Structure formats: C-alpha cells, structure tokens
Amino acid sequence: METAANTSQFKIILGSSSVHRQKVLSEMGYNFTVMTADIDERSIRKEKPEELVVALAEAKAEAIIPKLPIGHFQKDAEASVLVTCDQGTIREKPSSKEEARQFIKDYSGGSAATVSSVLVTNLRTGFRKGDLDKVEIYFHAIPDQVIDNLIEEEMILNVAGGLITEHPLMLPYIKQVVGTMDSVMGLPKALTERLIVEAL
C-alpha cells in the first residue's frame, strides 16, 4: 500500500480549519495546505447523521473547488488531492451552556457515538471517493465539578454534541472507545489513507 512516504508524488489540500484534523494529517506524515469552505452548515439538513456528514463533506468540496486553479492541476504532472470531511454525533453543537451541560450529563455513565465522513477528490482527473467511519465511546460517571469546568471553557460549544473527548478533563472518564480516537477527532487515519491511495 502506498503510504505517506510517497508524498513527493502528489500534493494534498485539506479542506478544513480544524486544528485537530490538521494534527491528525500531520501525524500521518503528510505535508499539506489548508483551505476552508465558507458554507452555512446549518442550512444543510438530513434525517440521519450518516447522510448529513456525507452531504457536508460534499458541500465543502463544492465550495472549495471553484476557488482552485483546476486547469493548472489538470496539466500538472503531479496529482493533487482535496480532502474534505465532516464529523458529527446525533446532536448539533450545543446552543447554550445549559444544553452543553445536559449533553455531558447524558454521556455520564453512558455512551455516545460519532460518525465521520471523508471525501477525497483528485483535482487532476476529477475522480472522487468518500466513505464513513463510526466510533462508540463509553463513559464512567462524570462528576458535576468536571462538567462545570468543561462548560466554563466554552470550547465545548463549538463541538458537535459537546463531545470533547480529547480534553484533559474528559480523558479520565472515558471507559472504552470502540474505534479510533483520530476518528473521534474528525479524520480517521486508515480511511483517509485508503481513500487517498484509491484517488491517485
């Protein structure tokens, strides 16, 4: 299988402003540039989380591609790929501190699930391939004081479902992760690697 060691043969554009996704892609050994999609995510609605994250990843690609010099990519000897993605839970980002508190209380002693969508577009050939990755997270009971401290940082309001598993305050209360933490962070490594290879 082709790996990150072959990055000299192609260029990657990551269509995400997420520092977590950038960290994961860097850990995979890739050099990349970042572009963001200016879309209103709340205007895109789907019944199921799986359908929503796929639609959002596609919408991000559609928003970014017109900004790119596609003619240049088509003539370039090196392939260039655009990676867009979305990650969600069955819940939206909390609309208030009170809602975020309720979300975390619901996870306490229970579980949560995430679904990530990754879409890779070959900008030279137009080939596009996407897929999903799901993770289940099981929690110990989370003390009220920990919940209070998480809410005070307000970072939790920017995360789907208020599910901020990589936070140092939350980590001790994660009992089990069925899947990978990179998927929870929004960019499943194995899936992303496979799609990049298939797109080249």
Image (cartoon, rainbow, N blue to C red):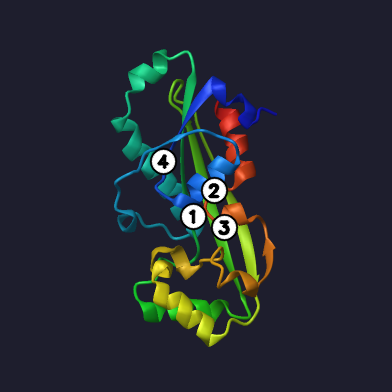
Q: CA distance from mark 3 to mark 4?
A: 18 Å
Mark closer to the observer (4, 1): 4
Residue 76 lies left or right of residue 189; in this view the side is left
Residue 155, compared with residue 33, is above or below; it is below
Label 4 Cα neighbours within 10 Å, binned few <14 / some 14-19 / many ≥20: many
Q: How many marks?
A: 4
Give the label on residue 187, or none. Answer: 2
Measuring from the top left, give residue 64's x and y in whole percent. 34, 37
Which picture quadrant has residue 66?
top left
Residue hosting label 3: 184
Residue 156 lies left or right of residue 110; in this view the side is left
Query: Is residue 181 visible to the viewer in this orientation of the structure?
Result: yes
Residue type at mark 3? Val
Q: CA distance from mark 2 to mark 4?
A: 12 Å
Residue hosting label 4: 15
Label 3 Cα neighbours within 10 Å, binned few <14 / some 14-19 / many ≥20: many
Residue hosting label 1: 87
Residue type at mark 1? Gln
- Which one is earlier in the sequence, the residue at label 2 or at label 4? 4
Mark closer to the observer (1, 2): 2
| Residue at (65, 30) in percent of width and height | 3
Q: Are marks 4 and 1 in contact (CB under 8 Å)?
A: no
Label 2 Cα neighbours within 10 Å, binned few <14 / some 14-19 / many ≥20: many
- Which one is earlier in the sequence, the residue at label 1 or at label 3? 1
Residue type at mark 2? Leu
Q: Are marks 1 and 3 in contact (CB under 8 Å)?
A: yes
Q: Quadrant of the N terminus?
A: top right
Q: CA distance from mark 4 to mark 1?
A: 13 Å
Q: Are marks 1 and 2 in contact (CB under 8 Å)?
A: yes
User: Considering depth in this image, is 55 or 189 the residue closer to the camera?
Assistant: 189
| Residue at (53, 52) in percent of width and height | 116
Label 1 Cα neighbours within 10 Å, binned few <14 / some 14-19 / many ≥20: many
